[in-house]
Amino acid sequence: MKIITAQEHQSLESPAVLTLANDVDPRTLDLNGVTRIDLQFPKFTDGRAYSQAFLLRRRLGFAGELRATGDVLIDQLVQMQRTGFDVAVLREGLDASAAQRQFDRFAGFYQGSAVGTQPHFAEMA
């Protein structure tokens, strides 16, 4: 997962970039030509964007970039990656270099995810 700062994030006005509010059902959208979807976390306690990301990856087969924006904290990054996000825009004032430690702490998982759907025991067979 790529981690960027708020200064590096650019909300492009382009038909290829779609910004979704966290109450929008992705199944109602036409994703033809969309290469990036920015999903919103208005507060760190609001996790609806996780469900949107999982739905986009697993059920709708979206292969473009999913970007987490808004109130994104370092302790959320591993779960974001597991639900299908490619890029996370950290909340203002957070150190992006500290984010890698989260991924180092949790190097593997027993259960599957939105990206790697096979559980660990099935991968070993």
Image (cartoon, rainbow, N blue to C red):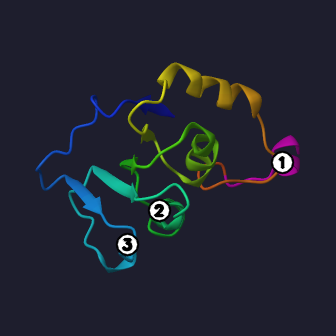
Residue that numbered label 1 is attached to: 110
| Nearer to the camera, 95 or 40 | 95
For the C terminus, give its image quadrant. Answer: top right
Residue at x 57% of width, y 41% of height: 77
Type of the residue with mark 1: Tyr
Please, what secondary structure does the residue beneath circle 3 have? helix
Q: Is residue 40 magenta?
A: no
Residue at x 44% of width, y 68% of height: 60
> Which mark is in front, 3 or 2?
2
Residue 119 in percent (x, y) is at 79, 53
Q: Which residue reaches farthest top? A: 97
Please, what secondary structure does the residue beneath circle 2 have? helix
CA distance separating discs 3 and 1: 28 Å
Q: Is residue 119 magenta?
A: yes
Residue at x 60% of width, y 56% of height: 114
Residue that numbered label 3 is attached to: 26
Please, what secondary structure does the residue beneath circle 1 have? loop
Q: Which residues are magenta?
A: 117-125
Type of the residue with mark 2: Ala
Type of the residue with mark 3: Pro
Residue 123 in percent (x, y) is at 81, 44
Residue that numbered label 2 is attached to: 49
CA distance separating discs 1 and 2: 23 Å
Q: Which residue reaches farthest bottom? A: 28
Q: Earlier in the sequence, mark 3 or mark 1?
A: 3
CA distance separating discs 3 and 2: 10 Å
Residue at x 48% of width, y 48% of height: 85
> Neighbour class for label 3 at 10 Å: few (<14), some, many (≥20)?
some
